[in-house]
């Protein structure tokens, strides 16, 4: 067979080969590499197969199994939730198997396939999705037909345990998705809540490379409120929500003002409600969709837009900042530390939320009220506290206040004490350590020599937080509390 004939046959089968590889690997880039490797092997082969389709499918399957064996080890240590690389369109079409093709490339199905061994997964894909004969599968994976039948049985058992359910009426599903994204773009909490299942889950895959939502957000109330806070300021700064079919299901690609990809969203719909929302935010998984945005810079811009009124010609800071214009917010990877002035402190103590305030339901804590009262007293006695004040801890991804942290007065002889507290529902994610790191950096910036803190002997979590930041235990105070300190090197 001459090379041009090989190339023509290969190009005809390329969509099928990619579709097989993607379902085995869950990665667009790895699937494309597997297809390219298949061509190289086919180009150099002297074999004249009876079926070119079976021959090339066998090659791409074996290559994909080898790649998956190494990829599984990396996924075991992946930071946070792991999702497949989003695919906006399947290049392979078979009208007789359209349902199997669509469902097998869904985010939910591909995540479920992670339960299977590489061999089980390959055999399952060839048989259940693409309807290959067992003799063809056996030659592809180097096993007997009987062994392949057993592999399929085991794979089906694993898949049936958690097989996702999807809306059968695709037209109804797509119409619901349009209503969802309309409500999302408008920031319409009620409209979103009406479309979400009561136990809806929203999960994001950031891979540690983009703003994240922790392990996920559960429940229609929380999900609808988070979504309603995200879109309007994002659109206000020039972002766009581009409706797409993502992995065969309704979804969208979010792009910044330059058209660069921010993330993808995928909706899983059943019985007329959105059951699951999956977001892929890891920039390493989005390069094939288009140029990727700087999500951290975009997050800062979106936060700024969220604080502004709808009239873009008027800028309005959070709270009344007139008493301390030089004090600025502190930014960390996941948090904003907002400096509180006296007017805002009085409002928090009275538990009066402003129109733009988003407080966790268990904020403020008693410790926050104590710290704010002390801040007001110090301000009355000694005047403006400058940067040595109380800060609200705001989760950057959604704008919710989750706690407070601050200095207990101005420094004395280069030393100052700090205190902090988090709402119980926000604990366990190392937010406190991240906020404390920011205050230590601020203290170092202002030339402090030492920062100290105290905690109860039975508060092991607080002790561990201080130790993560670099504090060491130095003794016990008169109230039988443990005293921790960190010495700052100044130049």
Image (cartoon, rainbow, N blue to C red):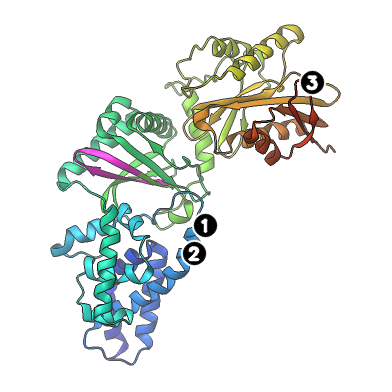
**Within the magenta stretch, is there residue 101?**
no
Is residue 125 visible from the viewing direction of this image?
no
Label located before the other in sequence (1 or 3): 1
Residue tagged by mark 2?
73
Residue at the location (35% across, 31% down)? 224
Main SS, magenta residues = strand
Crowdedness near tag 2: few (<14), some (14–19) or many (≥20) residues, C-alpha within 10 Å: few
**Within the magenta stretch, is there residue 263?**
yes
Q: Position of residue 7 (x, y in %)?
A: 30, 81
Residue at the location (75% across, 7% down)? 381
Residue tagged by mark 3?
478
- The residue segment tinted magenta is 262-277
Kindly check if marks 1 and 2 are in contact, taking CB atoms under 8 A apart as contact. Answer: yes
Kindly check if marks 3 and 2 are in contact, taking CB atoms under 8 A apart as contact. Answer: no
Relative to 456, residue 115 above or below: below
Q: Nearer the viewer, residue 330 or 477?
A: 477
- Name the element at disc 3: loop
Left or right, 40 with reference to 9: right
């Amino acid at each position: 067979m001459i090379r041009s004939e090989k190339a023509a046959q290969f190009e005809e089968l390329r969509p099928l080969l990619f579709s097989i590889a993607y379902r085995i690997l869950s990665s667009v880039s790895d699937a494309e590499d597997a297809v390219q490797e298949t061509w190289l092997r086919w180009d150099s082969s002297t074999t004249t197969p009876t079926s070119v389709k079976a021959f090339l499918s066998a090659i791409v399957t074996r290559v994909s199994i080898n790649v998956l064996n190494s990829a599984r080890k990396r996924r075991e240590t992946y930071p946070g939730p792991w999702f497949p690389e989003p695919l906006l369109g399947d290049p392979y079409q078979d009208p007789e198997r359209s349902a199997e093709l669509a469902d097998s490339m869904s985010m939910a199905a591909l995540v479920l396939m992670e339960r299977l061994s590489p061999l089980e997964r390959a055999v399952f894909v060839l048989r259940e999705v693409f309807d290959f004969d067992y003799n063809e599968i056996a030659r592809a994976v180097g096993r007997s037909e009987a062994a392949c039948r057993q592999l399929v049985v085991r794979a089906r058992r694993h898949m049936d345990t958690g097989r996702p359910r999807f809306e059968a009426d695709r037209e109804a599903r797509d119409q619901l998705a349009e209503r969802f994204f309309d409500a999302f773009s408008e920031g319409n909490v009620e409209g979103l809540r009406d479309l979400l299942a009561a136990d809806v889950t929203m999960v994001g895959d950031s891979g540690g490379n983009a703003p994240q939502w922790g392990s996920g957000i559960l429940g229609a109330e929380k999900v609808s409120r988070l979504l309603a806070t995200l879109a309007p300021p994002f659109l206000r700064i020039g972002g766009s929500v581009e409706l797409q079919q993502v992995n065969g299901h309704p979804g969208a690609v979010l792009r910044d003002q330059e058209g660069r990809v921010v993330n993808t969203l995928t909706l899983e719909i059943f019985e007329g409600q959105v059951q699951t929302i999956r977001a892929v935010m890891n920039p390493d998984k989005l390069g094939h969709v288009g140029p990727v945005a700087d999500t951290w810079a975009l997050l800062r811009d979106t936060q700024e837009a969220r604080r502004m009124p709808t009239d873009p010609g008027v800028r309005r800071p959070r709270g009344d900042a007139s008493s301390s214009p030089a004090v600025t917010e502190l930014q960390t990877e996941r948090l904003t530390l907002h400096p509180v002035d006296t007017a805002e402190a009085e409002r928090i103590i009275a538990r009066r939320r402003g129109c733009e305030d988003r407080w966790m339901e268990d904020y403020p804590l008693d410790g926050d009220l104590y710290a704010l009262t002390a801040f007001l007293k110090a301000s009355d006695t000694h005047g403006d506290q400058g940067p040595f004040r109380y800060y609200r801890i705001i989760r950057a991804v959604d704008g919710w206040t989750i706690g407070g942290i601050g200095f207990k007065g101005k420094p004395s002889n280069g030393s100052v004490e700090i205190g902090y507290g988090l709402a119980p529902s926000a604990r366990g994610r190392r937010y406190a350590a991240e906020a404390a790191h920011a205050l230590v950096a601020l203290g170092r910036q202002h030339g402090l020599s030492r920062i100290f803190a105290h905690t109860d002997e039975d508060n092991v979590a607080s002790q561990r937080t201080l130790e993560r930041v670099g504090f060491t235990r130095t003794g016990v105070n008169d109230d039988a509390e443990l005293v921790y300190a960190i010495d700052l090197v100044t130049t």
